[in-house]
Amino acid sequence: MIPYITEAIWQTVSQHLPAASEPDTIMLNAMPMCEPDKISDSATADVAWLKQVVMAIRTIRGEMNISPGKALPIRLRKGSDCDQQRTEKWKIAWCRLARLSEIEWLNDDAEVPASATAFVGALEIHIPMATLIDKTQELSRLHKALSKALSECERVSQKLNNPTFTDKAPATVVEKERVKLADGERNVLQLKEQITKVEQL
């Protein structure tokens, strides 16, 4: 069906283009060409971030069997200035794509209610689960995430402890792995804290 729908859209759009500037059918039109000077690195990074935060919430919904139609409140903590700016910029899109009822920023030292938690870099995304949480399922999810995070830290640590890698790899690649290890270790600590909170419910 897609080619026919595309052609129908084209027939409507082409009427608004300069006369004789385009062929009568999209099938005879040239493929769009990339214009590198119009590529925005900041916009690309923003959209990549938006995809990550939306997927983080959708993953929690799927793992905890929360209805996609249920609007959820979320609490954000420990994000960067860039995270806060992007949240403000993309708030409407984020709420629609992730089906959120509200987004609230907490101070870094603020007490967080028992929540299902996801991490995007340093940003903590908390979904208060007082009336939604299945304690057993959430602990299972967190332990799986912790196991995965520990394995990743171990893998990166072994790579950085291998002189063959650190001596031969470009400095930028080595530094990238060091940052990845630091992020992973922070993620492990955050997951352990969240497991403790859920266990106390």
Image (tube, rainbow, N blue to C red):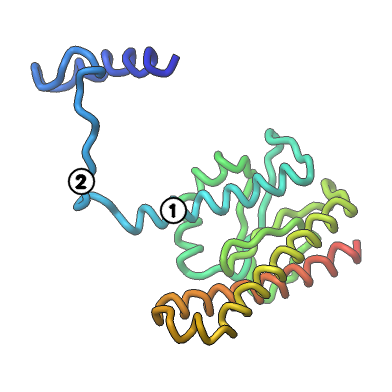
Q: Residue 150, relative to residue 142: is it above or below?
A: below
Q: How many marks?
A: 2
Task: Please state which of residues 21 and 80 is positioned toward the viewer in this rendering.
Answer: 21
Identify the residue under disc 1. Answer: 89
**In which quadrant is the N terminus drawn?**
top left
Q: Report the side of 35 relative to 4 (left or right).
A: left
User: Residue 184 got which mark?
Assistant: none
Relative vertical location of residue 72 with respect to residue 197 in this rendering, above or below: above
User: According to the image, label 2 marks what residue?
Assistant: 35
Q: Position of residue 37 (x, y in %)?
A: 19, 52
- Please name whichever residue, 164 or 37, is drawn nearer the observer in this view of the structure: 164
- Using the rendered view, name the quadrant where residue 147 is placed: bottom right
Residue drawn at (60%, 70%) of the image:
78
Q: Along the polypeptide, which appears first: circle 2 or circle 1?
A: 2
Q: Position of residue 25 (x, y in %)?
A: 22, 14
The residue carrying pointer 1 sits among few (fewer than 14), some (14 to 19) or many (20 or more) residues within 10 Å by Cα, namely few
Task: Indicate the secondary structure of the residue bearing disc 1.
Answer: helix
- Give the amino acid at mark 1: Lys
What residue is at 71 percent from the left and 59 percent from the top? 117
Residue at left offset 14%, top offset 20%:
22
Mark 2 and mark 1 residues within 8 Å of each other at the beta carbon: no
Q: Nearer the viewer, residue 32 or 192?
A: 32
